Amino acid sequence: QNSCLFHMIFNMLNTFNIHLDIINKHAIIWSRIFLICANEVGEHISFKGNLQNSLVEYARSTKKLVRNMMDDQQSSLDYLSNQVNELMNRVLLLNAEVLRKHLDPLPYKAVQSHGLDCTDIKDTIGSVSKTPTGLYIIHPEGSNYPFEVLCDMDFQGGGWTVVQKRTDGIITFQRTWSEYLDGFGDLSGEFWLGLRKIFHIVNQKATSFSLYVDLESENDKHAYAAYDGFWIEDEACSFKIHLGHYSGNAGDAFRGYRKEDNQNSMPFSTFDVDNDGCRPVCTIKQQPVKSCSNFSESTGWWFNQCGLANLNGVHRYTGRFLATGIHWDTWTVNNKPVKIKSVSMKIRRTFNPYFN
């Protein structure tokens, strides 16, 4: 019995060893399979990581490339902008140089003129070919030098010399006596031609001139005042203004309604040369005024105790007194003065000794 029992135990151990050996072999196989799978998973994870890194690097490089392209484009735009500004500055300098040469009063800088005034140019050049509206050089009799003017060759047959123009308020008319003497502004925009130049134009031998005042309201309505005679005295008399008969639909603001409103035959005034007749003061809407020019924000005009007209007043004035701005108080709507946004003053010969 013991021998049989021993033999049975031996067989069981042998069978157990065989199964254990099989289990070990399976364990080895599964370990190898696990290692293979682990390697594949690792490679997949590594590939995914590499792909993400590549995408991030591509996005960064693309962003950098776009930023560099934008910087290059901005540099090109800045360069072009600087070139344009430089060209514009050169054009402005050339224009200023040409204008300086044309307006230089020194005899040795004389410039050939187109005529005595715009009417003379129209009567001479215009008799051969149509003369367009624009800038011309004139040399009136009695003037020591030629100068540039704006000629209106379209309005009512042409031949008008524009002596004052207000449109957009870019040019301030708050000026000294000296500036009103010589003129200021831009002949292609807003300007005051200058008292000396106006004097030389209207005081030529055997000539007479008319004045046309063109007014435009804030709501784009037009009115005018025309005078069949216009001239001013010399500087010694402070350029006193003299007007002929009035016609038009804006009213005769120069002469006004009362004797004390009459600005005809009055000298020109500025804040630093006072000829306005306020001795010692004038009264405007119950307010004492010592100087009409100061009351009108230092603008110059032919004031008479201030009066009803000042076409050199502040452009589109929004203060308390309408009379401080551009005004022509005989042009009214519902008994109230019209607010004026633009105006021009132009003169033309009514008699030309060379063509009459």
Image: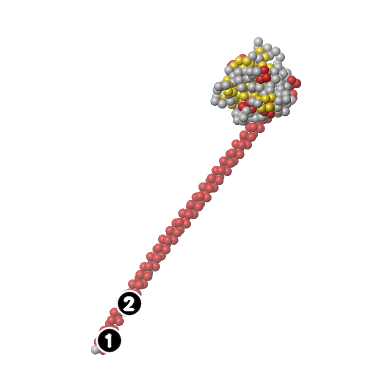
Q: Which quadrant holds residue 80?
A: top right
Please tell me which of labels 2 and 1 falls first in the chain: 1
- Residue at the image point whose x is 56% and y is 45% from the top: 72
Q: Secondary structure at mark 1?
A: helix
Task: Please name whichever residue, 45 or 351, is drawn nearer the observer in this view of the structure.
Answer: 351
Whole-percent x and y of residue 298? 68, 29
Marks 2 and 1: CB-CB under 8 Å? no
Q: Position of residue 318 (x, y in %)?
A: 60, 30
Mark 2: amino acid: Leu
Residue that protrudes farthest toward the top in the picture: 356
In the image, farthest residue toward the bottom = 2
> Quick one: quadrant of the N terminus?
bottom left
> Residue under circle 2?
20
Would you say 40 lies left or right of 59 here? left
Q: Is residue 281 above or below residue 71?
A: above
**Amino acid type indicated by mark 1:** Phe
Drawn side of residue 56 relative to residue 312, left or right: left
**Please, what secondary structure does the residue beneath circle 2 have?**
helix
Q: Position of residue 224 (x, y in %)?
A: 59, 19
Residue 276 placement: quadrant = top right
Q: Closer to the camera, 118 or 127?
A: 118
Q: Residue at x 58, y 17 (%)?
A: 249
Residue drawn at x 57%, y 21% is 335
The residue singled out by tag 1 in the image is: 6
